[in-house]
Image (cartoon, rainbow, N blue to C red):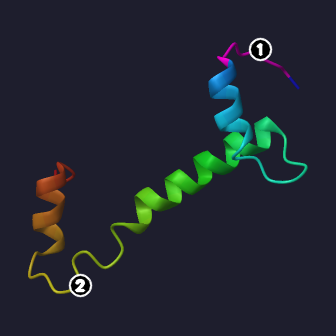
């Protein structure tokens, strides 16, 4: 396993350290935060088109996915 050394201020260390769960390493903390952040970004779109009349084709065109 490759390791990297990060230099941060004492204030940043204290803030990050306060987010750690019991016996959680900083690597585990960073992976957990990334996973939670990804889930939160996806969750906000669930059901967004539930009451919409927008078709799949129109959505693909809007997103630039239609060929």
Question: Residue 57, located in which quarter of the rendered image?
Answer: bottom left
Q: Main secondary structure of the magenta part?
A: loop
Residue 61 at x, y = what percent? 12, 56
Q: Position of residue 66 (x, y in %)?
A: 17, 54
Q: Return the mark for residue 5.
A: 1
Tags 1 and 2 touching, CB below 8 Å: no
- Residue 61 forms part of the magenta stretch: no
Q: Tag 2 or tag 1, which sits nearer the N-term? A: 1
Task: Please state which of residues 39 and 66 is positioned toward the viewer in this rendering.
Answer: 39
Q: Which residue is mark 2?
A: 50
- Crowd around label 1: few <14 · some 14–19 · many ≥20 (10 Å): few
Q: Residues within 10 Å of mark 2 (few under 14, many from 20)?
A: few
**50 displayed left or right of 16:** left
Residue at image coords 18%, 59%: 60
Please tell me whether mark 1 sits on a helix, a strand or a loop. loop
Residue numbers of the magenta segment: 2-9
Residue at 84% from the left image edge and 20% from the top image edge: 2
């Amino acid at each position: 396993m490759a390791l990297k050394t990060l230099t941060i201020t004492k204030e940043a260390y204290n803030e990050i350290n306060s987010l750690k769960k019991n016996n959680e390493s900083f690597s585990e903390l960073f992976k957990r935060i990334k996973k939670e952040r990804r889930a939160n970004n996806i969750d906000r779109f669930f059901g967004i088109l539930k009451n919409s009349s927008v078709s799949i084709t129109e959505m693909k065109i809007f997103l630039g996915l239609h060929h």
